[in-house]
Image (cartoon, helix red, strand yellow):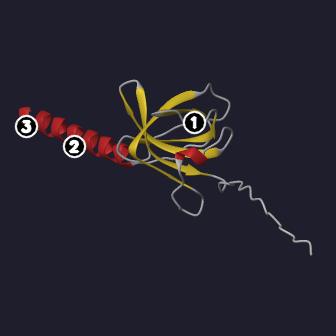
Amino acid sequence: MKHNRLAKLLAVTAAGALVAGTAMAQTTTSVGAHVGPVGVGMTTSTGAFVAAPGDDYFTFRAGTAEPVRYYYTKDTTIVDPAGHTVAWTDVRPDMPATVEYVKEGDRMIVKKVMLTKPVVTEHESTTTTTTTHP
């Protein structure tokens, strides 16, 4: 009787561990305001910048949700759709992007920003023409 009960308990424990391991191994990606795990503790959010980046954070809106403050570090990478690194100074409000981040306490620490559209920079040039009169 005791042997049968112990075997059942071990079987239930093993099944629970298998289910928990499978659930933890699943990864999802998010679109819009819905976010989900992408790796160990990594989450993505797709939306647009609300304001240009400040000293160590930027404000980002996922879908129709309220804007959220995301913090970045010197290790945070920001790339265009082709995978080229982009400077933070090139980021403008309303630029669409996907943000990969880890939540640490009440802060979202950004690991990578992938812009959805290429960065367009404007360059102003002037031409001077000199003519001489005989």
Q: In x, y percent, where is residue 29?
A: 52, 47
Q: Quadrant of the N terminus?
A: top left
**Residue type, label 2:** Ala
Q: Which residue is mark 3?
A: 3
Residue at 27% of width from left, 39% of height from top? Answer: 16
Query: In the rendered view, does 105 fall on the left or right side of 84?
Result: left
Q: Secondary structure at mark 2?
A: helix
Image quadrant where residue 123 sits: bottom right
Of the residues tagged 1 and 3, which is closer to the observer?
1
Of the residues tagged 2 and 3, which is closer to the observer?
2
Q: Are marks 2 and 3 in contact (CB under 8 Å)?
A: no
**How far apart are labels 2 and 3 at the CA level?**
17 Å
Q: In x, y percent, where is residue 5?
A: 13, 33
Q: Which residue is mark 1?
A: 34
Q: Secondary structure at mark 1?
A: loop
Residue at 60% of width from left, 48% of height from top? Answer: 90
Image quadrant where residue 73 sits: top left
Instruction: Say which label, 2 or 3, has the lower sequence index.
Output: 3
**How far apart are labels 1 and 2 at the CA level?**
33 Å
Graded by Cα atoms within 10 Å as few (under 14), some (14 to 19) or many (20 or more), the crowding at tag 3 reads few
Residue at 74% of width from left, 59% of height from top? Answer: 125
Q: Which residue is mark 2?
A: 14
Instruction: Say which label, 1 or 3, has the lower sequence index.
Output: 3
Image quadrant where residue 126 sits: bottom right
Residue at 91% of width from left, 72% of height from top? Answer: 133
Instruction: Say which label, 1 or 2, has the lower sequence index.
Output: 2
Q: Which mark is residue 118?
A: none
Graded by Cα atoms within 10 Å as few (under 14), some (14 to 19) or many (20 or more), the crowding at tag 1 reads few
Judging depth in this view, the residue of 101 and 74 nearest the camera is: 74
**Residue type, label 3:** His
Query: In the rendered view, does 35 fall on the left or right side of 111?
Result: right
